[in-house]
Amino acid sequence: MIWGSNTTIASAATDFTEFRDGLSPTLARLGKLKTTLTEGLVAADGGSIRSQRPRHVRPDRFTLSEVNQQDMKFGTFFLDLDPDNATADPPTSSTDWVSATAANLKNFAFADNTGKPFATGTIVGSLPWNNMIVDAGICVRLTKRGDPAVQAPVPTSTFKAKMDFAASTTAGAGIVADSVTGDAGVIKRDGTVVHIPFLTVADGYEHRLVIVNRNPKDVKYTVTFTDQAGGTSTPGDMAKGSAAANAMTTIDAADLVTVADSSATSATVTIVSDPSKVDIATALKTTGSGSYDTVLYKAVAN
């Protein structure tokens, strides 16, 4: 079994709802696997597989899991026997997963992942053991869900895969089905992220977000919020925008967010830039005294 693990980037420029470097903005090949089916078998007596006269071998179950228990509802995961197919689509039913002959084998695939944290499918059918090589791409197509249908942001994820095999023989129970496991791909997010633990819109204060962009072009930014206990944060018109090239952009907290039942929130700023090219700070002015408190935050790669 040969496992190939790719790194795919979810783009901050689209709030992580598209891939930056996938086969398309909504399709990515997380990895590849290639195997002959006999690699998934063990001779019960320790002898050779061939001596046990295996009649049919089949991949019985393919399991994909995210090692950090991330939610996988953002996409439909599947295997495709044309691993470089830029227009690959998941099968529409279990009968499309594998057919009885290699000539008809189009989508060697599993699961539509309609919300299960682990996408698992049983692969039906069997093929002669000596003329079947699995060469497949481990793919994900971004999928909108809900009513109205929306695309969930793609999280940073690390995938593992396992292939279980089954066999029938002409020599009785001389073959033991085995399984193989391997790395099945990584998804990362691009850009720079900064966490701001305190941002206030209280009377008597003027709080501002400051973005210094040293890139030769404008860069997009997105600000998301985490409520304090009892409060509700609603993003404002300036929670998404662009920071001007080779300039400082200053945004009032009142334009970033409206906070109900509280006077403060916390914020996460994501910018489509290398961390070395941007600085993020907040400036808090007490209007009564005119005093300022400025905090410079460490920008890190997402």
Image: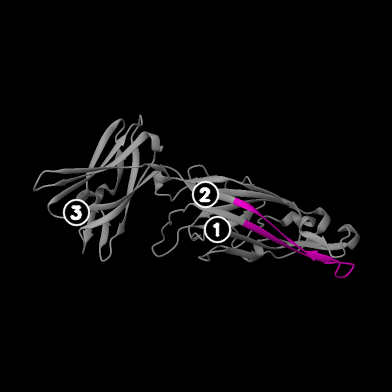
For the residues labelled 1 and 3, the Cα–Cα distance comes to 39 Å
- The colour scheme is one colour
Does residue 206 lie above or below 149 as drawn? above
From the viewer's perspective, is 278 left or right of 10? left
**Which residue is label 1 attached to?**
66
> Could you say which disc has been placed on residue 172 in the image?
none
Q: Secondary structure at mark 3?
A: loop
**Which residue is label 2 attached to?**
187
**Which residue is label 3 attached to?**
201
Residue under the point 23% across and 40% down: 250
Which residue ends up furthest to the left in the rendered image?
288
Name the amino acid type tagged 1. Glu
For the residues labelled 2 and 3, the Cα–Cα distance comes to 36 Å
Residue under the point 81% across and 61% down: 42
Residue 172 part of the magenta segment = yes
Specify which label sits upstream in the sequence, 2 or 1. 1
Q: Magenta region: which residues? A: 161-184
Name the amino acid type tagged 2. Ile
- Locate residue 181, reporting x and y percent: 67, 56
The C terminus is located in which quarter?
Answer: top left
From the viewer's perspective, is 88 left or right of 106? left
